[in-house]
Image (tube, grey):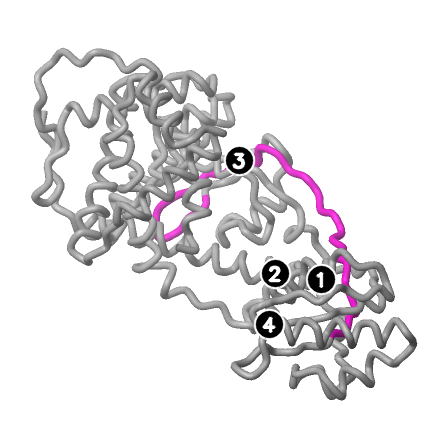
Amino acid sequence: MKHIAILAALLGGLLSVFPLHAAQVVELNRIVAVVDNEAITSLELEKRLQGIMVQLRQNGTAMPPLDILRRQVLERLIIERIQLTLADSRGVRVNDETLNEVITRIAAQNQLSLQQFREALEGDGVDFSDFREEVRHEITMNNLRTREVESRIDVTQQEVDDFLARQAGGDGLDSEYRLGHILIAVPEGASPEQVQAARSQAQQVLDELRAGADFRQMAITHSSGQQALQGGDLGWRKGGQLPTLFADSVMHLTPGEVSELLRSSSGFHIIKLLEKRGEERHYITQTHARHILVRSTELVSDFEARNKLARLRERVLQGEDFADLARAHSEDPGSGANGGDLGWANPGTFVGPFEEAMSKLRPDEISQPFRSQFGWHIVQVLERRQRDSTEELKRARAFDAIRQRKIEEETQDWLRRLRDEAYVEYKD
């Protein structure tokens, strides 16, 4: 379930694939492609195509020739169908409970109740059952990729050290970059002739871009990348989150500039630096506190535990030493021997009720008795301080960046292998 929040964000734009007022389809349904044993019909293709066209118009993107856009959309449907077929064979399925939770979150992101969200969809001509299945498919493919790719990705501390060492002296890790991306794909096991043909196509695309061609339209028309139908826009990313292949080139680009051709196992890449912005220092408030814990048991009721702490609190207020009382009465084996001292703690270190009670206190103030999952507490805040956590944050970001790089690179290779190994027959 940890992916649900991420999925909700990814699916937040899913409405854009549905036209606000779907055009009437008058031609008879027919098969346009066969993927293994699964058929893709003309109705499926036209429905997705109409949605993409609405999205392009809303974004103000110049429309590529219709036959090229249709080919790109069909290729996207083929890749999706391959993944869904594999997911079914692997037993990767999404139950209605999970599906309902995700759709409820999408509705909440649009500030609507589930019923209002459904009515809004249907008011725009979108069948709610179709929408549910689109969401189910998105979750299924995400879960499949998690199982087949993400679960196998490891990041070592040595990799983090090496990554940070390479970044030392530069601003790559903390600066943010918004990139455009075009991929001219090369199939796995391609012949020298196929590689040369892809290189020639990529060079022609690059020449046209440098002559002033619109990057978004060129991406929609030519790219095999996962963001092709979004104009190749990869969005904002920290320097450390950029794919390894792109990182060095990006550092030498100015906004608006296009890279040379970049070669990977997937094919030839072209990137454009759309925008760049700088870093900020990050500070956190640390709290130094101490507490006394009394547990309720079969012999000690909640009422008795709470009253005992209330009496201990009164004794501290009357002048007795908190640390001495903690050593004598606290049932926390970790801190009791140290006078209840919890040391300096970052936000989020403690469980919710403890964190909430502690955050409301001023230095030297003692809380009223409160309960957490561990028992009853009183807590005293000794002092607070601001701490620069930029370096820790850099390390955490480096870990995430390395893992994300590996996931993206392996996902691209994995999808290419699936596509090359699948049986696909196009029907006129």
x then y, percent, for residue 416: 28, 49
Image quadrant holding the N terminus, namely bottom left
Specify the amino acid type for callout 1. Glu
Is residue 194 found inside the magenta-colored segment of the image?
Answer: no
Q: Is residue 317 above or below residue 297?
A: above
Q: Tell me the mark number nearer the camera, choosing from 3 and 4.
A: 4
> In the image shown, does 398 or 369 lie closer to the viewer?
369
Q: Tell me the mark number nearer the camera, choosing from 4 and 2.
A: 4
Residue found 53% across the figure and 49% down from its top: 242
- What distance separates the C-alpha of mark 3 from that of mark 2? 44 Å
Specify the amino acid type for callout 3. Lys
Q: Is residue 315 left or right of residue 271?
A: right
Q: Is residue 12 left or right of residue 427?
A: right
x then y, percent, for residue 189: 23, 54
- What distance separates the C-alpha of mark 3 from that of mark 4? 63 Å
Report the residue marked by disc 2. Answer: 352
Report the residue marked by disc 4. Answer: 302
First in sequence: mark 4 or mark 2? 4
First in sequence: mark 4 or mark 1? 4
x then y, percent, for residue 207: 45, 29
